[in-house]
Structure formats: C-alpha cells, structure tokens
Image (spheres, grey):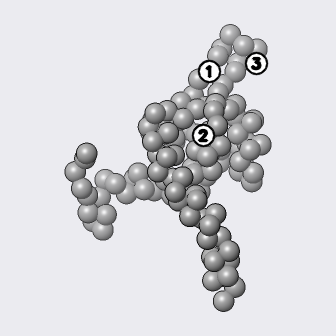
Amino acid sequence: MGTAHDLLAARCPSWSVLNLVGARWVPTVLNALDSGPLRFTELKRVVEGVTAKALTETLRTLESDGIVDRLETPAAVPPKVEYSLTALGRSLFEVLVPVRDWAEQHVGDIAEARRR
C-alpha cells in the first residue's frame, strides 16, 4: 500500500489521479470498455454526446496513464485499432462501480434537490 497523502495540500500527488477520475468522459469510457475491447467508432456510438475530439483526447490521456490499452492491427485495411482496459484500468473501474451504483440509486434525490 502506498503512503498516505494530504489531499488538502496544494501539491498533493494524488490530485492528478483524482482529476483524471473526475474528468468528464473518463467514467463513461471506462464503463463502455468494461464489456470488452471496442473500436473508436463503436466507442463514439456507445458514449452518447461525446465529440470525436473529446473522445480522442480522453483515450490518449487514459492510454498515457496506463488505464487503457490501444491495440493497432496495421495489416488490416483500413488499419484496425481497438481500445481495452488494462489491469490498472480494470482496478480503477472496479472502484467506480459503487459510485455508479450510488448515482443510479440517488438520481431522483439529486433531481429533487436541484428543483428546490
């Protein structure tokens, strides 16, 4: 287990990870990839509302952070590219499942609070 960090400190290293998790499309992309590898166009169709630019940026960030794997099959015409969760990505997704479940359970409560 790593060392504990003070999340209130201005230079806490954990903030970069928390910012990744809180990025707009990250939880949705991870959720989409939970069922298995997907090509870019499949991901764009599944993740409703995401632009090609936002999806590209999200996938690049997730790939550079070791959360998503990009597998290119150049022998295919056109070249085939699939995205999948790495072991690290799967461990992150497992942590997000309870948050997703909480959101689904309380979406009505949040909507009601916003109406007030």
Q: What residue type is labelled 1?
A: Glu
Where, by quadrant of the figure, is residue 30 drawn? top right
**Residue 64 against residue 82 in the figure, above or below:** below
- What amino acid is labelled 3 in the image? Pro
Label for residue 78? 3
Earlier along the polypeptide chain: callout 3 or callout 2? 2
Residue 5 visible from this viewpoint: yes
Which circle, 3 or 2, is nearer the viewer? 2
* SS type, badge 3: loop
Under circle 1, the secondary element is strand
Q: Are marks 3 and 1 in contact (CB under 8 Å)?
A: no
Q: Is residue 40 left or right of residue 12?
A: right
Q: Nearer the viewer, mark 1 or mark 2?
A: 2
**Vertical relation: 86 (above or below) 100:** above
Q: Earlier in the sequence, mark 3 or mark 1?
A: 1
In this image, 17 relative to 102: left or right?
Answer: left
Q: Mark 1 points at which residue?
A: 72
Disc 1 to disc 2, how far (Cα)?
A: 19 Å
**Distance Cα–Cα, label 3 vs label 2:** 25 Å
**As drawn, is 106 to the left or to the right of 61?**
right
Question: Badge 2 is on which residue?
Answer: 34
Distance from label 3 to label 1 (Cα)? 11 Å
Mark 2 residue element: loop
* Image location (x, y in percent) of residue 18: 42, 56
Who comes first in sequence, dot 1 or dot 2? 2
State the image quarter where residue 53 is shown.
Answer: top right
Q: Where is residue 100 in the image (x, y as percent from the top left)?
A: 58, 58
Asked whether the residues under the numbered discs 3 and 2 touch, taking CB atoms below 8 Å apart as contact, a structural biologist would say: no
Q: Residue at x 57, y 51 (%)?
A: 27
Above or below 56: residue 73: above
| 114 over 67 or under it: above or below | below
